[in-house]
Image: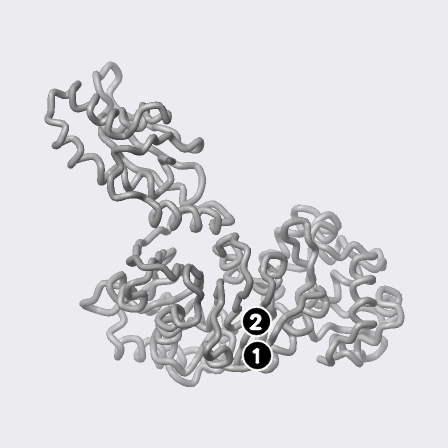
Amino acid sequence: MRELTGNVVEGLRTAFAGAGYTTDGVAERLGVQANAALARNETAAAARRTASGDALDTMIRLFLLQRAVPEGLVDKAFPGIDLVALGIVTRSGGEVRAVLDIRPFAEDARDWWVVADLTPGLDGRREPMRSDYVLGIAPASLSLIHLTVPIKADRALDIGTGCGIQSLHLADRVNQLTATDVNPRALQLAKATAALNHIDLDLRDGSLYEPVRDERFDLIVSNPPYVISPPGGDLTYRETEFTGDAVVEQLVRQAPNHLTDGGWCQLLANWTCVRGEDWQDRIATWTADRSAWAVQREQLDPSEYVELWLRDAGLHGTAQYTTRYDEWVRYLDEHNVEAIGMGWITLHNVEGSLAAEAWPYEIERPIGPHVLHRFERLEGLPADLTALHLHVADDVIQETTGQPGAEDPATIVLRRQRGMRRAEQVDTVLAGFVGASDGDLSAGQILAALADLMDRPVVDVLSDYLPQIRNLVIEGFLNY
């Protein structure tokens, strides 16, 4: 792709905005059913709704549906812009086809356009991807956007930027943005994304922290090539020559050397669950004495994992599939991998320890504000809770079950509707404590009153329930 200059950028922006080629504009034109089908990589319904020949339909067909479009319609939609010379489309026999994907992305009332390679797998077509393929807007990249803590920062670093979507997300709240990648094609397309959206982005070529040696940042984000595969994988956007999960390990271990005091590092990750080892203990050696939180959203056995990524590469049904499958499973077995965890890691550059958990349940999106608040509660909570005046979070509901007419319920569950949407089973004493937490009495006063009701020594009640109360505060059931 040729570099986008000022006049070309303004011409493309004017064309896209004038046609209504935005997230809302596309959604309105396609309608609910065609949008849902397109999300499943099926284009027929969208094609039926984009036959008018106007500029918006032309753009949708060209970039989102990857259909051939009459040359005249493209010239009309992009007046004065030679898309062929820019390397965005090819022309043949009076028709034009896209060779790059330019699609709208919306966030916080801002409309962006993201430049990437064409989305694979439309209408069941699966072809092996080029080794330097640049992934566009995908579930993983959106997950990292939703995970990122909503802080203002002076400097931020996007490692493995790909098409540049993470940098777009950060642009409005970071003064200096640096993005890196080992793929020259990714840097080229990220540069086009930045130019098209008027983003000042310092792009650098190199692996992990090499391009930013001796520099520090307030925020580091990364959707790295975390796929755990044998040597020879040729998809740069997802695979490296690192052994096992070493690429994720190095990103985490080295993060404190590139963070300001109190800075944040957040990344999506895959990690190996090695026979005879606890995966939480392995990650704890990476985070060392830093405050961190690792959440395993899914765990796959080796066969499931290999099948997932072979399909992703478009190899299912090809002659290479069986050979690559056997090689990959054998590689994992040789490294004693019994499962692969998939999730995220957040590291806060202050003294602390790792909290690591499996959480495959539905969560709120974006989850970033909750991540930030959880760290704030954890790190700011005093050792002695008895003087705190707590109150129940607005989103907490209580569920009870039991036999009709029973004096006490058989089970009591406190459930949060926001954040991680956790549920905590409690006994009648802890439920009573939560019910009395309206900010009026201190935690110590409430527990003393409960001890008196139960005719138990206050010291015993404090010993039994303060650790549980601490957990409820950290997880946001109770605020102070």
Report the residue marked by disc 1.
204
Residue at far top of view: 405
Residue at image position (74%, 75%) is 88
The kind of residue tagged 1 is Arg
Residue at image position (66%, 57%) is 105
97 horizontally vs 287: left or right: right
> Percent from the top left, x then y, of residue 447?
22, 27
431 horizontally vs 242: left or right: left
Q: In this view, does 424 lie above or below 14?
A: above
Are the residues tagged 1 and 2 within 8 Å (C-beta)?
A: yes
Separation of marks 1 and 2 at Cα, in angstroms: 8 Å
The answer to whether residue 228 of the structure is visible from this angle is no
> Percent from the top left, x then y, of residue 110?
68, 53
Report the residue marked by disc 2.
178
State which quadrant residue 84 falls in. Answer: bottom right
Q: In which quarter of the image is the N terminus?
A: bottom right
> Percent from the top left, x then y, of residue 125?
60, 70
